[in-house]
Amino acid sequence: MSYNKTANITAETINPRVKMFNYEPCGEIARHAERLQEELNKNPGSRPFQEIIYCNLGNPQALGQRPITFFREVLSLCDNPALLHRDEAHLLFSQCAMKRARKIIEAMPGRDSGPYTPSQGIKSLRESVADGIAGRDGYPSRPQDIFLTDGASSAINLTMQILIRSEEDAFLCPLPEYPLYSGSILLHGGTMVPYNLSEDGDWGLEIFEVKRCLEEARISGLTVRAMVVINPGNPTGQVLSVTNQEEIVEFCRKEGLVILADEVYQDNVYVEDKKFNSFKKVARSLGYNEDDISIVSYHSVSMGYYGECGRRGGYMEICGFGEDVMGEICKVASLTLCPNIGGQILTSLVMDTPKIGDDCFEKFLAEKESIHSSLVKRAKTLEKAFSSLEGVTCNRIEGAIYLFPKIHLPAAAIKAAKTEGVSPDIFYACRLLNDAGIAVVPGSGFHQVSGRNRAAGTYHIRCTILPGEDKIKTMISRLRAFHESFMNEFRDRN
Amino acid sequence: MSYNKTANITAETINPRVKMFNYEPCGEIARHAERLQEELNKNPGSRPFQEIIYCNLGNPQALGQRPITFFREVLSLCDNPALLHRDEAHLLFSQCAMKRARKIIEAMPGRDSGPYTPSQGIKSLRESVADGIAGRDGYPSRPQDIFLTDGASSAINLTMQILIRSEEDAFLCPLPEYPLYSGSILLHGGTMVPYNLSEDGDWGLEIFEVKRCLEEARISGLTVRAMVVINPGNPTGQVLSVTNQEEIVEFCRKEGLVILADEVYQDNVYVEDKKFNSFKKVARSLGYNEDDISIVSYHSVSMGYYGECGRRGGYMEICGFGEDVMGEICKVASLTLCPNIGGQILTSLVMDTPKIGDDCFEKFLAEKESIHSSLVKRAKTLEKAFSSLEGVTCNRIEGAIYLFPKIHLPAAAIKAAKTEGVSPDIFYACRLLNDAGIAVVPGSGFHQVSGRNRAAGTYHIRCTILPGEDKIKTMISRLRAFHESFMNEFRDRN
């Protein structure tokens, strides 16, 4: 070791909180799937399949979902506003995209899409978002309550950075959970208090369970600051009923908890008997305003029929925090100067789409409905396929883009997993990948298996509905064959 | 107060570290300038000037700098890859932009610019960046050492999040400083150890001064992990000599400090006798490799002749951290999923520009040189103007986009400031804004005035060279008149 190595930067000498959290999208299965695909590219005959079918990541456009033409045309024009003054541009862009791009550019600092914007986002774009929210909910929304962000994850991280003072500050989070929450809470020095969703109740949320967790947390000395709700649910795919949401609002109001409402799947609802309602709308309809209850709503351009994940656009609407706090949030946001302009523009488009009468309306609607109806079809098909497998139960997928089936693994499989030193759900998911070329995320990545958890001993996988319809067909036939052979290998024989 | 307000979110109940730091771009002068401009728009005759001249923010395109056509064409095409298959596109885009966009899109996951990318950034784009660095330095660079980021600030925040374990972890930072560093270090729970740049030595860095600060810090129990160097300097505009850089490398190697090299102004050098050298190049030329010294270099698309601030693109090249740390950085980066794709693309373009023979090369070069030569002209003009003012000394501006003149304020002005309860530099900057409509940042925003500081009692303003040449002319004549009248009002009479 040379002298300078006294300050060597290794995993032993960095922020210990960084090492504490796990984040499954970066996980072993994803890396193994990549290696496997590379191996297949080199030796095409080495496995009984030619390509991995990726059902692990919620990344629609990587799996064939096409972008909405209107969105991309506006982005393209805003990147290169010189096009707006060229006659030939009419050959390549719709009137309606040119009109919108012109409107956006004219309201920008410097009349171009290059400068830093205010840290909270460009005012005119925040106005579009606020109008979109008001139109969706039927209740007013104010641009000064909107922060445009680089996707919802940045907004969630920023919230944790603002709210967490010490390890005693705690957050109620659903289990199975989206691991961004546990990761972000840990990294920022707080404590996650998990509450269980009810698998037997279609992954609904039982308020007595949340209350039990809150009380336990308070007894152990924690200050519970907020309750995280993901609706529609990730990884569980449920859409909360209005009654259920009303209970949550009443509960949080009474207990003095902020509602952190992850509403990024608001345009992914697949059932006739349920629709998306924002928590703000539910609170307002109960007569509560921002003095009664604080709500932060997160949305992004990554999901829904838009699926523009890599664009990193999103917003949070903050209702009920003090004026002074809004200034402090702006200050922390300014440490990264401003959200990226492309993401800001796209967020405004998602919240303010073409209207009847616009020349691109028909095309926009057709593209949107085609994506949506295909997602509905894939959701139903996969739900049926999983439910038909031996020992698998699968709740109805009402929204979001995931199924989270429970796999009743035979004792011999659990034993084999133990021998290999891995959790049984990981064992199943690895076999599924190696033998059938299907990548899914093991349920334990969502902390479904936990000592505190009444669901301990149950095993799940998370499977997206995102591969194209043809690939879903292939995937199902591979899954059936694999599962049958897996069960034949390990089936309980008593 | 209703019951829920027990958990009210106010500035009193948020993360106290958030309240601890100041960040001048969000500061009072900037807000006051905005209010003043609004007032002028309403009552055009209310002041002796019609518009504010903004010399406070480093936001080139907000002040008229035009974007490089090639960059914007490629971005525009990547946003809407359908254009690449349209004959009419040749009417609107150069061959060379179409070729580059095609190459970028073909190497992307899903062959479109929509999906999440790896958290570290798209591999092919990281390869372009690494090639660009290798070409610039004459020493190899590896794509696995590059993290594409949402601008340099995100990268700096990420570094602090990784390196800081407790308040005892400290960072040597230059004074006057760019307040992102103090803000980020405070927010992430570490300690800043300031070292003074030498105003009398053209804002150069004296290694004995840094050593003094290091020793003091160590005696007080701090673990100094890294030394921040901003070259070319913000707010001081110096370009370090190679000899000075060699001293820094030897010092950090010997003392086991990581060099955090903020090199975002590498394309802003205005003098013939100096050029930009990266710290990595200097270290390699001394024969040191990544086992001898760890260096993180930050760059972005925001400055230089590109000036694409709002695009939020950048990279950090990390040399000398352990493999395991790179994985942990990737994990933290994955909490915000990935850097925005537009920023990633633009970063690759900035590091891999059109070459001789490309159909757009002449135009690219002309645009680049026109911006650069105008910046040189404005730098010289402003330097001369400030130096000619009574009681003002102004170091040579060698690089970056700022002048940081010292204003020798008369005792009566200092007294008047005291009466108003503000720092004398703020007093001067406010008067300059109110009386002459010129917005600058008071030096105390860069912590130049500090008890520990041997420069205590000196007063500065930071003034950018970014307004267009015509506006600079207006600005100088307003500045001269203001300064004369200010001095007449307060001049020492003894």
Image (cartoon, coloured by chain):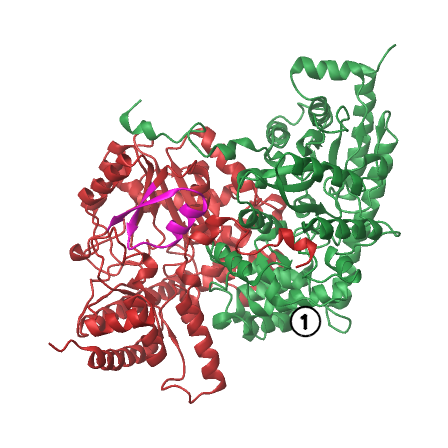
Chain colours: A green, B red
Q: Mark 1 lies on which chain?
A: A
**Along the viewing direction, whichever of A6 and A172 lies nearer the viewer:** A172
Q: Position of residue B53 (x, y in %)?
A: 37, 75
Q: Where does the image place residue A323, in percent across and percent down from the top left? A: 56, 63
Secondary structure category for the residue under label 1: helix
Q: In this view, does A167 lie to the left or right of B304?
A: right
Residue bearing the label numbered 1? A96
Lateral position of residue A4 relative to residue A489, left or right: left
Q: Is residue B196 left or right of residue A17?
A: left
Q: Is A233 in the magenta? A: no
Q: Quadrant of the C terminus of chain A?
A: top right
- A169 versus B152 height, above or below: above
Q: Can residue A151 be seen in this view?
A: yes
Instruction: Give the vertical position of B439 relative to A223 (above or below).
Output: below
Q: Write down the region rendered in magenta.
A: B171-196
- Residue B187 located within the stretch drawn in magenta: yes
Image x and y of residue B296, in percent: 37, 41
Query: Count the marks: how many?
Result: 1
Which residue type carries mark 1?
Answer: Cys
Which picture quadrant has residue A412?
Answer: top right
For the N terminus of chain A, give its image quadrant: top left
